[in-house]
Amino acid sequence: MESFRLDHTRVRAPYVRLAKRVPVPGGGHEVLAYDLRLRTPNTELLSPKVIHSLEHLLAVSLRSVTQGVEGVKVLDVSPMGCRTGFYLTFLSEAGHLSLERVVGLVEEALDEALGYESVPGASMESCGGYEEHDLPGARDVIQGLRFESLVALRDPPLLR
Ligand code: ZN
C-alpha cells in the first residue's frame, strides 16, 4: 500500500495529495485517488461523529461542485480509519484532472457544505449509524479550515 509509505510524522494538515493514479483498461480514462488530510497525523483526531457528518456532507457537496467539470466524476468519498481525513476517488479523462483543480474543488465543496441546514442522508433509512452525527462539530471543522490554506502536496515525504 502506497499510503503506508507516507512518512506520517513529517506531514502537516490541511493538505491534498495524489495517492494513486490507475489507467482504466481500454484507454482514455484514469482513476485518481487523493488524500484529503484535515488533521495532522497523531495530533487532534476528528471525533467519530464529526468525521461521519463530514463524510455525508462532502459526499454530496463534492459531487455537486464537480458536476460542472467536464470529463470528471466523483467515484467515492471515504473517511480514513485514523480519523484524520478522507480518501477522494475520481474517474477522469486521462490527464484532465490536476492536483490544484482538486484543491479548488474541495474548497468549493467545503464552502457549499457550510450552507447545508442538516446532514444529508442522515435518516435511519439511508445511514447505518444515523444517530452518530455532529453537524455543529463538522461546521466548526470547516470554519477552522477556512483560515488555513489547503496545500497541494506535490512531493510528500516517504519512508524508506
Ligand atoms: Zn452514515
Image (cartoon, helix red, strand yellow):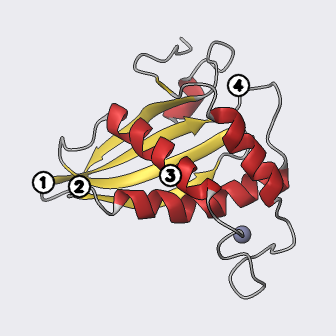
The answer to whether mark 2 and mark 4 are in CB contact below 8 A is no
**Badge 2 or badge 4: first in the primary sequence:** 2
Question: Compared to 93, does 126 lie above or below?
Answer: below
Q: Earlier in the sequence, mark 4 or mark 1?
A: 1
Question: Quick one: label 3 or label 2, which is nearer the N terminus?
Answer: 2
Lower position in the chain sequence, tag 4 or tag 3? 4
Q: Is residue 107 above or below residue 127?
A: above
Q: Tell me the CA gap for discs 4 and 3.
A: 21 Å
Residue 43 in picture, x, y percent from top left: 81, 24
- Report x, y in % for residue 53: 73, 60
- Amino acid residing under circle 1: Gly
Decide: is 155 above or below 120.
above
Which quadrant of the structure image shows residue 116? bottom right
Q: For the point 78% across and 59% down, which residue is it?
A: 135
Can you tell which mark lies on residue 28?
1
| Contact? badges 4 and 3 (CB < 8 Å) | no
Residue labelled with disc 4:
40
- Callout in the foreground (2, 4): 4
Amino acid at the residue labelled 2:
Val
